[in-house]
């Protein structure tokens, strides 16, 4: 079989120089992102760290590895298996996770060098391409955040499969084609973008050889295209595309706006203005890069050198799957596409390296502008992520130590910022590490403003009356996050809370809302409630609780849920009595497994400051001698 017309490679280098040619880009990657070796777990990491615990509870490893997630993803290698395997061996030591990420990215660097050298024949181009890719700000989160490991693992499969296919075209040895098939198939377990690989391979065939001789190699790609099509259909059946939310797809004019935005972020950092670059400088760097790419592509095509179209095809094909995600635009989606632009710019560097000064300037100026705006921002953002992750580590490990010091007590944290909340508590960080009964001080509501506001903050902040009761009954310890350490401030905080709570208790001696699953409110619940589970509680056929009535309190709100399996048997009849007077009578039907009900307070109770509620549900399910009626979260009297 004829090959894919490899470009003539420059003279062979001496062994030492050849070794440095391969190793220096890898060393640069490690040095440039050295802060990423020390980052800890943040945000979505805690959801993945919970899987090992869930697998042990459910005794179903395959479910945790392959069950579709809420956003419709099935990534057993880059998310589930990655976290579960390393956590089972190393626990919460983040360094092994980081080493796996860095090793994978290093392999990407080597493959980018090889592919660029193979496409251009220039060692300068093969050396420059991974450098240009490395400094791009798109790589910051993959190199600092474990949950985006898929962004460096997927290109390993794409580049590896393509390299094997090129070897097959060069040698005609079918073993390379079959190994390509294995690598390509495994890539689906890393990231859905792997689906475009057959198109990338076809682009290589079309743009690296005489198109008249491309028919035979293209037929070898057809089985791969069939696999991609089957994967798409099966994936749609197993994990339907979300119709709303950040992962909803929009095939309208917004796609063009997203494309323009990603093109801009490929050439200049998304966070450039926030980290010191002037707006004018950013515009100049963007225009310089765009004009340079346009001119180089036009020049190459006029000289019948179509390889530049392969580089652009890589960018376009790997970017296309994320363009419809209008509500979830993020720069790390460019990690894979900018490989194509890095190879394209490196090809220009290789061609103009030995040209006269003025011609060489055509290459040096745009590359210099790109490096000038990218490098400082990428380094600054990397360092910022390191600082944020270390704060999360201080919080989580500090609370873990506090739990060992105060077993059985509720832990309340003061001094948590919005960023820290968004990267830890908003993602159930303490549940992931096996710690429960951790809450925030009431004043945290004044300084934490999560985006988006999902209501989770409310469930973590107890009423001052509930906290005061817990403190006076020696059920709670209060810690403050100060100067990178957790400090026990229970004594001082008790004095401060005392002055505020005494005045408050004169008008409302009890809190007007109860988070039923929060142990801080247990003293307000009757004896029939079951123990809390994951922030909620079951009630049997009847349960009671006591509430304070705020000034102007006229409505009773109940939030809870009922497992769908129970509702399929029949609806649940829910009745609520306030001091013996019926306040609400309703039914809960399938598929309304999560419910919210709002009832008017009986007028006869006007003027009361404390009331007793009785909740009745019928029918109930009986299991192991225990009745199960409904699950409740928040119950409150509202103005």
Image (cartoon, rainbow, N blue to C red):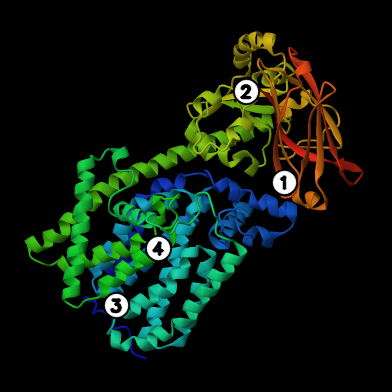
What residue did someone put label 4 on? 320
Residue at the far right: name it.
Answer: 625
Q: Position of residue 13 (x, y in %)?
A: 25, 72
121 or 535, nearer to the observer? 535
Sequence-first tag of 4 and 1: 4
Q: Tell me which corner region of the image, top left, top right, bottom left or bottom right, holds residue 345.
A: bottom left
- Comparing labels 4 and 1, the label whose residue is closer to the camera: 1
Image location (x, y in percent) of residue 550:
67, 17
- Sequence order check: which comes first, mark 2 or mark 3? 3
Vertical position of residue 395 compared to residue 11: above or below: above
Q: Residue at x 17, y 64 (%)?
A: 295
Q: Is 200 rendered above or below residue 332? A: below
Q: Which residue of the protein is positioned furthest toward the bottom in this rendering?
A: 1
Among the 4 quarters of the image, the one containing residue 491: top right
Is residue 297 in sight in this rendering?
A: yes
Q: Is residue 126 left or right of residue 57?
A: left
* Residue drawn at point x = 29 percent, y = 74 percent: 119
Q: Which mark is residue 593?
A: 1
- In the picture, the quarter occupied by the C terminus is top right
The reply to whether residue 30 is in sight is no
x, y percentage for residue 449?
Answer: 50, 31
Q: Residues within 10 Å of mark 2 (few under 14, many from 20)?
A: many
Q: Nearer the viewer, mark 2 or mark 3?
A: 3
Secondary element under disc 4, as helix, strand or loop, is: helix
| Among numbered discs 2 and 4, the one appearing first in the sequence | 4
Q: Residue at x 61, y 33 (%)?
A: 399
Query: On screen, 397 above or below 210?
Result: above
The residue labelled by disc 3 is 207
How far separated are the C-alphas under marks 4 and 1? 37 Å
**Please, what secondary structure does the residue beneath circle 1 have?**
loop
The numbered mark at residue 478 is 2
Give the residue drawn at x 34%, y 80%.
205
């Amino acid at each position: 079989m004829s090959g894919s017309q490899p470009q003539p490679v420059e003279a062979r280098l001496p062994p030492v120089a050849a070794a440095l040619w391969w190793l220096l880009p890898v060393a640069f990657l490690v040095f440039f992102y050295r802060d990423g070796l020390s980052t800890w777990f943040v945000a979505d990491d805690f959801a993945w760290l919970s899987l090992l615990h869930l697998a042990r509870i459910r005794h179903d490893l395959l479910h945790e590895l392959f069950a579709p997630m809420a956003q419709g993803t099935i990534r057993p290698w880059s998310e589930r298996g990655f976290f579960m395997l390393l956590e089972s061996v190393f626990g919460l030591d983040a360094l092994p996770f980081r080493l796996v990420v860095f090793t994978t990215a290093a392999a990407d660097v080597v493959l980018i060098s090889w592919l660029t050298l193979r496409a251009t024949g220039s060692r300068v181009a093969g050396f420059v391409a991974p450098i240009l890719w490395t400094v791009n700000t798109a790589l910051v989160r993959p190199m600092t955040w474990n949950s985006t490991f898929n962004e460096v693992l997927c290109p390993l499969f794409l580049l590896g499969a393509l390299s094997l296919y090129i070897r097959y075209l060069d040698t005609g040895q079918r073993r390379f084609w079959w190994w390509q098939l294995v690598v390509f198939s495994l890539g689906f377990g890393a990231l859905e973008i792997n689906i475009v690989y057959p198109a990338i391979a076809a682009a290589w065939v079309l743009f690296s050889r005489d198109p008249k001789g491309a028919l035979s190699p293209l037929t070898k790609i057809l089985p791969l295209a069939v696999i991609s099509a089957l994967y798409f259909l099966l994936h749609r059946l197993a994990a339907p595309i979300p119709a709303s939310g950040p992962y909803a797809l929009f095939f309208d004019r917004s796609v063009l706006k997203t494309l323009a935005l990603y093109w801009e972020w490929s050439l200049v950092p998304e966070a450039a203005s926030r980290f010191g670059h002037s707006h004018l400088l950013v515009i100049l760097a963007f225009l310089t890069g765009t004009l340079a790419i346009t001119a180089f592509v036009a020049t190459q095509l006029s000289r019948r050198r179509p390889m530049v179209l392969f580089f652009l095809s890589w960018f376009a094909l790997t970017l296309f799957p994320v363009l419809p995600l209008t509500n979830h635009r993020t720069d790390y989606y460019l990690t894979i596409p900018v490989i194509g632009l890095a190879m394209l710019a490196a090809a220009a560097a290789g061609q103009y390296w030995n040209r006269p000064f003025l011609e060489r300037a055509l290459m040096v100026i745009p590359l210099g502008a790109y490096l000038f705006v990218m490098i400082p921002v990428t380094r600054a953002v990397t360092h910022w992520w390191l600082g944020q992750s270390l704060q999360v580590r201080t919080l989580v490990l500090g609370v873990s130590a506090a739990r060992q010091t105060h077993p059985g007590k509720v832990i309340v944290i003061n001094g948590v910022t919005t960023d820290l909340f968004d990267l830890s508590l908003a993602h159930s960080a303490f549940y992931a590490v096996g710690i429960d009964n951790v809450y925030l001080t009431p004043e945290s509501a004044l300084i934490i403003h999560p985006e988006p506001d999902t209501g989770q903050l409310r469930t973590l902040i107890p009423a001052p009356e509930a906290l005061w009761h817990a403190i006076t009954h020696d059920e709670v310890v209060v810690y403050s996050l100060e100067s990178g350490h957790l400090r026990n401030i229970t004594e001082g905080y008790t004095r401060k809370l005392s002055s505020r709570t005494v005045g408050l208790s004169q008008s409302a001696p009890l809190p007007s809302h109860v988070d039923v699953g929060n142990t801080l409110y247990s003293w307000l619940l009757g004896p029939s409630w079951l123990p809390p589970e994951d922030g909620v509680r079951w009630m049997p056929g009847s349960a009671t609780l006591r509430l304070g009535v705020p000034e102007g309190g006229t409505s009773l709100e109940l939030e809870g849920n009922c497992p769908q399996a129970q509702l399929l048997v029949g609806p649940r009849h829910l009745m609520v009595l306030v001091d013996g007077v019926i306040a609400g009578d309703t039914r809960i039907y399938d598929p309304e497994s999560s419910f919210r009900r709002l009832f008017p307070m009986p007028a006869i109770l006007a003027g009361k400051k404390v009331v007793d509620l009785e909740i009745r549900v019928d029918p109930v399910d009986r299991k192991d001698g225990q009745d199960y009626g409904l699950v409740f979260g928040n119950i409150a009297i509202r103005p």
